[in-house]
């Protein structure tokens, strides 16, 4: 599950091999954060520019382990 939107969304979609596309879900921007994060086993944030983000804080507040760059 990939939540959010941005200028590189189309690029991210293209990186998924056709045979694996059914394994991925892109939700776009969402307001109901808790219900979506509760579906995760782990929260991931891969970024070059952000330090600590709201996403990381939300994962931690809901007891999810975090993998971040």
Image (cartoon, rainbow, N blue to C red):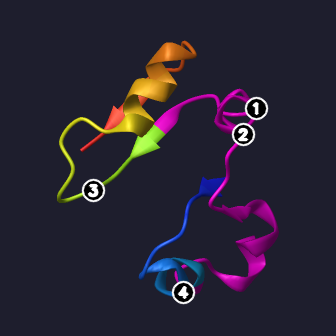
Q: Which residue is mark 1?
A: 35
Q: Which residue is mark 4?
A: 10
Q: Secondary structure at mark 3?
A: loop
Q: Secondary structure at mark 4?
A: helix
Residue under the image location 17 percent in, 58 percent down: 49
Side of 58 where 47 appears, left or right = left
Distance (Cα) linking label 3 and label 4? 17 Å
In front: label 2 or label 1: 2
Q: Which mark is residue 32?
A: 2
Q: Is residue 20 magenta?
A: yes
- Give neighbour class at mark 2: few <14, some 14-19, many 20+ (Cα, 10 Å): few
Return the x and y of residue 45 as percentages of the image width and height.
38, 46
In front: label 2 or label 4: 2
Q: Is residue 34 magenta?
A: yes
Sooner in the amino-acid sequence: mark 2 or mark 4: 4
In the rendered image, the vertical position of residue 16 relative to residue 11, given as above or below: above
Residue 7 sits in quarter:
bottom left
Return the x and y of residue 33 as percentages of the image width and height.
65, 37
Q: Which residue is mark 3?
A: 47
Distance (Cα) linking label 2 and label 3? 22 Å
- Give neighbour class at mark 1: few <14, some 14-19, many 20+ (Cα, 10 Å): few
Residue under the image location 76 percent in, 61 percent down: 23
State yes or no: discs 2 and 1 in contact (Cβ < 8 Å). Answer: yes
For the record, the magenta segment spans: 14-43
């Amino acid at each position: 599950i990939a939540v959010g939107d941005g200028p590189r969304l189309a690029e991210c979609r293209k990186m998924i091999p056709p045979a694996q596309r059914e394994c991925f879900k892109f939700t776009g921007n969402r307001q109901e954060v808790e219900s979506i994060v509760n579906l995760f086993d782990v929260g991931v944030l891969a970024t070059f520019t952000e330090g600590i983000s709201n996403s990381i804080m939300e994962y931690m507040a809901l007891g999810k382990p975090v993998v971040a760059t």
